[in-house]
Image (spheres, helix red, strand yellow):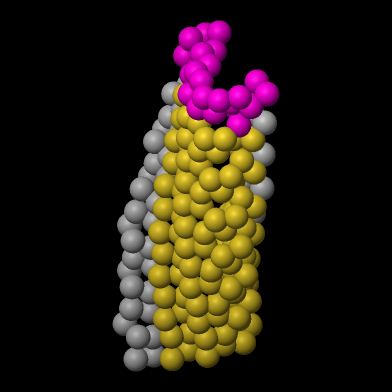
Amino acid sequence: HGKGKLIGEDGKEVYEGKFKDGQRNGYGKMKYSDGSIYEGNWQNGIWSGVGKFIWTEGEEYEGNWDNNLRVKYGIMKYSDGAVFKGDWQNDKKNGRGRYIWKDGQEYEGDWVDDHRNGYGTMKYSNGNVYKGNWKNDKRDGLGTLTWADGAEYEGNWTNGRREGYGTMKYR
């Protein structure tokens, strides 16, 4: 019980924080031999509760953990400059979330297993906006694409393409 420091056999892995019954429990910081870092809550030696993990490539996740997996709400910053803020389940984007690409594109809506699935709004960097249904990261089902010049297509989409019934309006 209490606080302490544990240094791995290789001397590169270092944990500083709370212990209970010989295991990491409570708040602590772990530096791994590959350079990655976890700082947050532990339960019986695993990441559990609120914490932050920083990968060696510079990516970082701050949010909820359960059994070393991202869960509930969290913010993921990717090495390419993209950011995701939203719901996680089993270490994947699941539920509602907002993904912003480095170039300014933005999707806000439903996610299933790291893919846009369900209803969402995509704002493209060229000014176009799509509001509607998604399946495996592609426009699929009913949706409306509005071009930056005001033209608009409202109707059915299949596998990312206009297909079936729809209405095209030009401005």
Residue drawn at 63 percent across, 27 percent down:
20
Q: Could you say where residue 139 lies in the image, as x and y percent from the top left?
A: 56, 70
Q: Could you say where residue 15 lies in the image, as x and y percent from the top left?
A: 50, 22
Give yes or no for residue 150 being in the magenta stretch.
no
- Name the quadrant containing residue 163: bottom right
Q: Quadrant of the N terminus?
A: top right
Q: Residue furthest front?
A: 1
Residue drawn at 38 percent across, 86 percent down:
151
- Residue 153 versus residue 74: which sits nearer the camera? 74
Q: Could you say where residue 21 lies in the image, as x and y percent from the top left?
A: 68, 23
Q: Quadrant of the C terminus?
A: bottom left
- Examine the rendered structure and indicate whether residue 19 appears above or below residue 84: above
Q: Could you say where residue 6 lies in the image, as x and y percent from the top left?
A: 53, 16
- Name the quadrant containing residue 73: bottom right
Give yes or no for residue 23 being in the magenta stretch.
yes
Main SS of the magenta part reads strand
- Residue 57 versus residue 139: which sits nearer the camera? 57
- Residue 114 versus residue 157: which sits nearer the camera? 114
- Examine the rendered structure and indicate whether residue 145 appears above or below residue 43: below
Residue drawn at 56 percent across, 65 percent down:
96
Can residue 32 be seen here?
no
Residue drawn at 52 percent across, 90 percent down:
167
- Examine the rendered structure and indicate whether residue 113 appears above or below residue 158: above
Count of residue discs: 0
Q: Is residue 152 left or right of residue 42?
A: left
Can residue 77 be seen here?
yes
Magenta segment, which residues?
1-25
